[in-house]
Amino acid sequence: MSPSPVSLGADLELERTTDPIVAWRTWRLTGRRDGTNLRLRPVAGRAKPWAPERPTEAVCRLGRMHVAPNVDCTCGLHATREPDLLRRTKSPGVLGRVALWGRVVEHELGYRAQFGYPQRLALVCFLCFWQWGPLRCRADVVGYFGLGRMMPFCDDHLVAARRHGMAPAIELDARGVEQELRSTYVVDALAR
């Protein structure tokens, strides 16, 4: 079933779709100090984590009384057409392909959707991701910084973090954490 237009904006189109649109997204990673209870959290704000094994539904964080996404607002689950656009994201820890459906607003850089769920995930060293993009950002270690905050690093950037007084309280093997994350959300690895 193809999407059907509901209304048009100057550069936005609102569609209602039951077939998922596949796009790119980044998340922050949170969990316990032993690498369990892992959750994907939006990189911006204090939004709730994406729940494992059930769709995430967008709500308007501005407290407006409309269904998210709305063409006259910035609400919705955001994703891009190309992963390279996400390099400017604030401290991403996870890169993935996400399925979006329901009400979808398409715009110049990607989409804002009513519902979403990750399809494929990979941990990323956020510094490598900023510098070189999605093809050269593999994580070797996941640092636990307390209060559930976790950050993947490559070996070189972990050394730099330690040198600048930002050493994690606990260091976990990234392969094990990524396996646990994919198991938690029941998704496949992101091919690079």
Image (cartoon, rainbow, N blue to C red):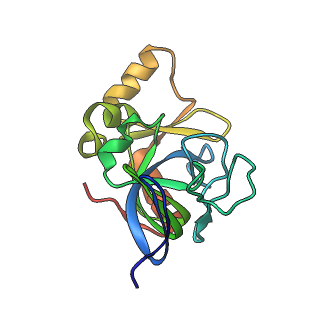
The quadrant the N terminus occupies is bottom left
Is residue 119 at all visible to an observer of this figure?
yes
Please tell me which residue is depicted at 57% across the width and 56% down the height of the picture.
Answer: 76
Residue 120: x and y in percent read: 39, 63
Residue 51, compared with residue 87, is above or below; it is: below
| Number of numbered markers | 0
Q: Give 164 or 115, whichever is nearer the viewer.
A: 115
Please tell me which residue is depicted at 38% across the width and 66% down the height of the picture.
Answer: 22
Quadrant housing residue 190: bottom left
Residue 90: x and y in percent read: 48, 34
Residue 49: x and y in percent read: 63, 53
Question: Relative to residue 6, is residue 158 drawn left or right?
Answer: left
Residue 102: x and y in percent read: 54, 72
| In the image, farthest residue toward the top | 164
Residue 83, compared with residue 130, is above or below; it is: below
The quadrant the C terminus occupies is bottom left
Q: Give 50 or 139, whichever is nearer the viewer.
A: 50
Question: Relative to residue 111, is residue 130 drawn left or right?
Answer: left
Is residue 96 at all visible to an observer of this figure?
no
| In the image, farthest residue toward the bottom | 1
Residue 139, compared with residue 185, is above or below; it is: above
Residue 113, compared with residue 41, is above or below; it is: below
Q: Give 119 or 38, whichever is nearer the viewer.
A: 119
Question: Relative to residue 145, is residue 138 drawn left or right?
Answer: left
Please tell me which residue is depicted at 32% across the width and 33% down the height of the picture.
Answer: 128
